[in-house]
Image (spheres, rainbow, N blue to C red):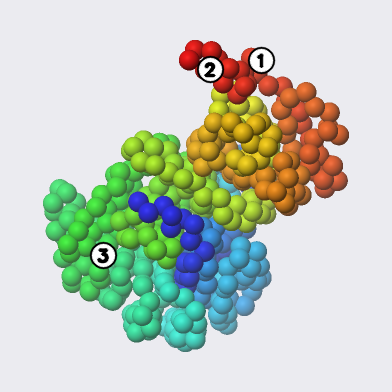
Amino acid sequence: MDLARLQHLNKARVLVVGDVMLDRYWLGDTGRISPEAPVPVVKVSSLEDKAGGAANVAKNVAHLDGKVGLLGLIGQDDIGQTLERILESENIHSQLVSVTGLPTIAKMRVISRHQQVVRLDLEETFTQAHSCLLLEKLQQVIDDYDYVLFSDYNKGALSAIQEMITVAKAAGKIVLVDPKSSDFSIYKGADFITPNLNEFKLAGGEVKSEEALTVSARKLLADAGVDAMLLTRSEQGMSLISQTEKHHFAAQVREVSDVTGAGDTVIATLTTMLGAGMDAKDAVEVANIAAGIAVSKLGAATVTPEELSQKLGQYLIENGEHYQAPFDDVHQHIAFAKRNGERIVFTNGCFDILHAGHVKYLAQAKAMGDKLVVGLNNDESISRLKGADRPINPLDERAMVLSALASVDWVIPFGSEAEGDTPAELIAQLSPDILVKGGDYKVSEIAGAEHVLSTGGRVEVLDFLNGCSTSNIIKKAQATE
């Protein structure tokens, strides 16, 4: 797998076209049954609005650092305006077409104790004429993108999809489709389609044996005039099938929390990885890992490059391959987390030889918030602080080991000559909610503490595990030589 391509995710230029919608969540507790009808009463404590449908696909691309545009249809209403504001905050260049007489599609869910009590759908089907408005917009912006991703939720925005694919292919673009129609021929000319197992069977696919599945998939592709199929098969993983090749990838999730939006994550990751220069097989392998991350979260979730980095590191090490963790664009993902209301915890250190004291300390730090950022002294900084014979392990290896810990969300190196050997400048850039330091320190002695306190955060000092230190480990190793 060419993991160097993970450093080029921002080179992916993707245009998402399809059925956009707003996902609205009312969240609260349930303590009684209504006297008016045999239904639970939910005392709403919070409201969350999120990008849904094709807009969620675009959000997935954006969170993977792809440059993404979005075309879709909305009504002339407050919900449409809310969706546009969300998209702007997510770094998505949206050009939504507002139409008269029809509402913006919205899925409204009441959630109590992590369970959906009821869903209310606000929608009407857009017409062929409305879809032609998107076709006109597509012709205007197509040259700004290399990949066109059609997200079909069967709400009418893609009624003119065959004409849209023709325009995209005439412009030399790679076309991917997340299909909803059981007639795959309407996607003629696409490079990839990504049906799930149910959609595949409705289209005429056979699943009685692996051989029957492959044969029927290739027949569907040939009849439809589509080059390749990425068939998502739930707990059975996913298969990439063309007329000449087939690659199967086992599911990479151990615990499923919610499959909502998993298909969005798959096609968004596949497209972004292709846009970064990966071949199709590697791109699907990464998309499979991304799907495993997404379904382990509650709700329609996105995946960051750091999460992919962590899981890819574990996956490749388990398969005997080398892995080097990327560090680019971490700041943007921390900003996404902050906008989602997550509390950012920061700590730092050399972590030259990871030991039990480090693991306990990092777990305690993570427990104070939602996301843990570890500032990691680079090799030059450690040599200045510890001596010419340190570090024992180079930066990439230390980062890989830290990233594999469940408690660590992001690793950011520091310690250039310009920065110095403390993380004060990095802390000022990140403005974490909680700064954690291990050892016998006063708050006034901790680098970055003044900035964190001035921005309303707090500073915590944790004790190290007695007897655990890198220096002691090195001394013991030298004594046994």
Judged from this view, the residue extending furthest toward the front is: 388
Label 1: which secondary element? loop
Q: In this view, does 64 lie above or below 369?
A: below
Label 2: which secondary element? helix
Compare marks 1 and 2 and give the one earlier in the sequence. Answer: 1
> In this figure, which residue is indicated by the disc labeled 1?
466
What is the CA distance from the residue labelled 3 to the residue labelled 2?
Answer: 57 Å
Q: Tell me which amino acid carries mark 2.
A: Gln
Residue 383: percent from left, percent from top: 64, 36
> In this figure, which residue is indicated by the disc labeled 3?
228
Other residues around mark 3 within 10 Å, as few (<14) / some (14–19) / many (≥20): many
Other residues around mark 1 within 10 Å, as few (<14) / some (14–19) / many (≥20): few
Q: Tell me which amino acid carries mark 3.
A: Ala
What residue lies at 72% left-to-right and 41% top-to-bottom?
421
Does any portion of residue 462 appear in the rendered image?
Answer: yes
- Tell which tag, 3 or 2, sits nearer the viewer: 2
> In this figure, which residue is indicated by the disc labeled 2?
478
The label on residue 302 is none
For the residues bearing labels 3 and 2, Cβ distance under 8 angstroms:
no
